[in-house]
Amino acid sequence: MQSITKDCEVEVSYDKNGVKGAWYRATLEDSPTKSQRKKLLRVRYTKLLKEDRSSHLTETVHHSLIRPVPPEDDGAVLGEGSVVDAYYKGGWWSGLVVKRKEEDDPITYLVSFDSPPDINHFERKQLRAHLDWTGSKWVRPENKELGKSVFSSGTMVELRRSFTWRPAIIVKKVENEERFIVKYGDDTSFRCSENSRISVIDSRNVRPRQPLYSVGEYELLDHIEVVYGSVWSEGVVRGILFKGRYMISFGKTKVASVQVSFSHLRPPMEWEDGIWHNRPKSKSKIFGKYYTRKRKRGQVEHNSDLNGTVRTPTSNVEDTQAKDRMMVLPFANKSPLWKIYETMEVFKKLPQNPHFSPLIESTSEDFREGSALGMMASFSGLLDKLKDLETDVSVSKLGTLKESFTKLEKHGFDVTRPLSRINKLLDLKDRQLKILEERRGLDKERMDESSRRRKAEVKSGETERKIVEVKHKILDLQRQEAVLKEKKEAAEEQKDQACRNIWKVESCARDLVVKLEDVEFDFETILSAPW
């Protein structure tokens, strides 16, 4: 039977801020008693630090929240339905294995948590079999039966947002509601991290992961879905540059805004009544200008008869594959600055292949190359600005940078990494602002408590003064009482003396009465005597 003593290592249950079932290692700094009369014990956590991170956090907790350290994990095989503890955020969190991913190397486990709802991937070394402490022995709970629903916990799904589908994982179904708690995936492999966003989504906007569907090749004006980062967006094939490379437009725009490869496309499908259906093939009815690359590089041709299409000539056998992969530009790139940009370090680390197609609509042909060169310089300058940011950068400045990169993205710049960094910085700023707001709240609370303490001190001083005054009055009253007692004793003595005098006078009066009676008797005797 395990016991806990002062200075031994223990585990403490953390039930705060909506967290339940998490155990943190700590050192017991108090001596528990057998009678458990001492219900509160002081502990010092091994991993948790104070808010200012100056030292390990110490606090006083109820003895029922403290248990011995469980025995070492025996390495038992864990499967779906196993109740486990996952090492997460510095502690051991109780959860349930909902998926065992044999295809990962090493094998990973998808573990869901209830309080708060969450789900994460863990390796076997980050898990241990869950054990409950009864007070005298450790008990391992039975495996749980998992639901067989299409949308059970741990299921990979896609979430609809306008005309896009985003990867996510089901955390759990909201009880008695047609909604799900989901965790967004960081990429199309449906991986998620502890910083991934968790949301509550209406069931109508949730569908299973779309299955792979083989397509030979796409034709002009085919409706498709394009993956960008982790998001599948609906688009239309606006041009075929060569086999396996397409120009795509999104939404209602008439101009192709991005060049993608075949591997980044998929045909749209629909999920209805629990079954996947191929969407009927339809052609886009959104027409506009088109541009096509001729055999001579840099020339642009406008034609309204082919309704917004781009096609690379297939009969030009002299063109090499490298030439075929060159972007179709809406201007002749004659400036020597292009060679300078190619040698710049920033474009070596982040190769760019912009198409500048929006310039066809927004800029006359004479100014397109200059505008394009300006965008190249802007991209380099924006990266330098992003790199040189300080920790006190404002949210508005980050927002301006994000907006600038987004504008460049419309011209075909690959801004995935800059935007990802900016989004991470915005998330950190959001966390920073929340922490500062919480700190301001604590400072206000501390000031309020300090004010209440000062008022209490003043009131305590006034009360103490009144107590002293009352004590002085008590002393005066006690002195008066003593004087009155003396007067009372003197009056009592006078009373007793008067009583003694009265008794003495009454005694003399009784003697006189006797003598008077004797005189009267003698008088009557004389009068009644015979002659």
Image: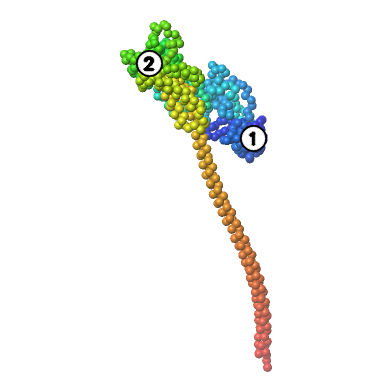
Location of the N terminus by quadrant is top right
From the viewer's side, name the closer residue of 24 and 232: 232
Say what secondary structure mark 2 lies in.
Answer: strand
**Residue 66 in the image, given as x and y percentages of width and height:** 61, 34
Disc ID at residue 523: none
Looking at the image, is mark 1 or mark 2 nearer the viewer?
2
Q: Residue furthest left?
A: 305
Residue under pointer 1: 28
Name which quarter of the figure residue 531 lies in: bottom right
From the viewer's side, name the closer residue of 495 and 192: 192
User: Residue at coordinates 51% horizontally, 26% vertically from top-left?
Assistant: 387
Q: Residue furthest front?
A: 336
Name the residue type under label 2. Answer: Arg
Q: Are marks 1 and 2 in contact (CB under 8 Å)?
A: no
Name the residue type under label 1. Answer: Leu
Residue under pointer 2: 238
Q: Is residue 122 visible?
A: yes
**Residue 336 in the image, given as x and y percentages of width and height:** 44, 17
Report the Cα–Cα distance between label 1 and label 2: 69 Å
**Residue 133 in the image, given as x and y percentages of width and height:** 61, 30
User: Residue at coordinates 55% horizontally, 48% vertically from top-left?
Assistant: 454
User: Residue at coordinates 60% horizontally, 31% vertically from top-left?
Assistant: 47
Side of 130 relative to 385 (left or right): right
Q: Earlier in the sequence, mark 1 or mark 2?
A: 1
Q: Residue furthest bottom?
A: 531
